[in-house]
Image: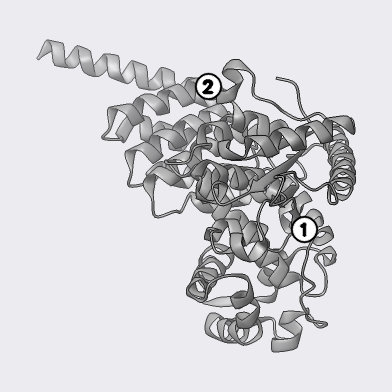
Amino acid sequence: MADEDVYICYHDSDQDFATFLTEHLEKEGLKVWRPYGDESSSKGKALVKAKVCIVALSADSLQDKEIEDAISLAYISDKPLFPVALKDFPVLEKGLTFSMKLILAKLNWMFFIPAEDSGDYPLDSMPTLTSSIQREIERVLETRQQQAEEDIESNMEDQQRKGFSRRRAFYKRWNSRQDAVETVDFWEDNFGLATEVTWIQFREAFMKVYQEQIKAQMPEDKIQWIVNILYGDVLELRKVVTRKMYDDFCGDASWGPDRFFLRLMDYAKGSIAMRGVFNMKSTVRLDAVQNLGQFRTAPVITSLLSLLNDNDANMRAVAAIALGKTEVKSKHVVSKLISKLTDDDRLVREATCLSLGHLKAKSAVPHLVKRWRSDLISDVRQAAEVALQQVGSDEAKDALHMTHLLSQEMSSLEAEN
């Protein structure tokens, strides 16, 4: 499957519009992915490989779980998203799911509402859409070239510190609403030169400053969800918040004068998109896991690491598998995976063993040996043995050899008795 410029995400009932859009984009020299034969089952793979994604929004598409999953997959793969609407925004807004609204609502929408008399789609917005897509494709190609010249893994921790994401730049370019932002850093404005504050103090200041902004972006009942993400994922349930922890999360100054809030909302969007993509009922989960190497960016790694602590054991297991697929072997990733070797769920332990083996994580050998020798579940023990064989280090080989010898001696003693 060749890499295409544009992937159009649409409901089957909007096929006429997708054809109309494809023909006009191809006239401008853009390559648009079309499903051919068996490739109709590879939509997720095509979306990951495409450079930009257009989402056709209609009454039917807003009811389609596959469309929602595709939007989430596009978001976590840092794909520039272009919402094109076939109805007026107030009509469609009512049908947006929470995740759709969070990801799409603040982007510039382009409208192709068909004429009532003829049913023809207007062309007024086509030049703007085409030129916008072409500019984003150029930026995507530039970024890919830079990544090809850099060691992504060695820069991963620095990217995480800065909050690196192509979508951040894209969203700043295409933000349709210019919200008022703080002219003073949130920490400095609320805590001055303090080097640490309690979580309670931090939460009170956060709600005072940002509650209304959050209400403008999501239902009021989701405010607590944002607070939970801040406390659980970002601050890792710390009772004391330090200035260093805050600065590390905020990233560099390129986020703008209100970098804390922008970074938090970007993290929230990524969090809900990741959960949508890797949910066991997701229509794109397999494609996402199989193609993670295509978008092993810092936001994806950060989100997967947070999913290792999800309440759903299936989500933890999928996150462990996905981290192995990213091929990122940083100390932070490996140490987080090692901590899951003692998870209460057998599938999580098994998935973690296999991921550590795939990553050839030498530092995990003693922990894998312990799983191999002591886990009560045979599938986990087998996964640990496979992992040790995959690591292939001298320590792993010695551990395998010694354990096999001990097993033979024990079998011999049993036979004698």
Give the residue type that dot 1 points to: Tyr
Tell me how far mark 1 sits from mark 2, CA to CA: 41 Å
Q: Any mark on residue 390, and which?
A: 2
Of mark 1 and mark 2, the one earlier in the sequence is: 1
Would you identify the image quadrant in which residue 176 lies? bottom right
**Which image quarter is the C terminus in?**
top left
> Residue 197 appears at what percent x and percent y?
61, 83
> Residue 244 appears at what percent x and percent y?
70, 71
Please state if 332 lies on the left or on the right of 253 as rendered. left
Name the residue rendered at 61%, 87% in the picture.
208
Q: Residues within 10 Å of mark 2 (few under 14, many from 20)?
A: some
> Residue 99 appears at what percent x and percent y?
56, 57
Res. 294 visible in picture:
no
> Residue 104 appears at what percent x and percent y?
66, 57
Q: Residues within 10 Å of mark 1 (few under 14, many from 20)?
A: some
**Which image quarter is the N terminus in?**
top right
Would you identify the image quadrant in which residue 16 lies? top right
Q: Any mark on residue 339, and which?
A: none
Under tag 1, what secondary structure?
Answer: helix
Q: Kindly identify which residue carries mark 1.
A: 171
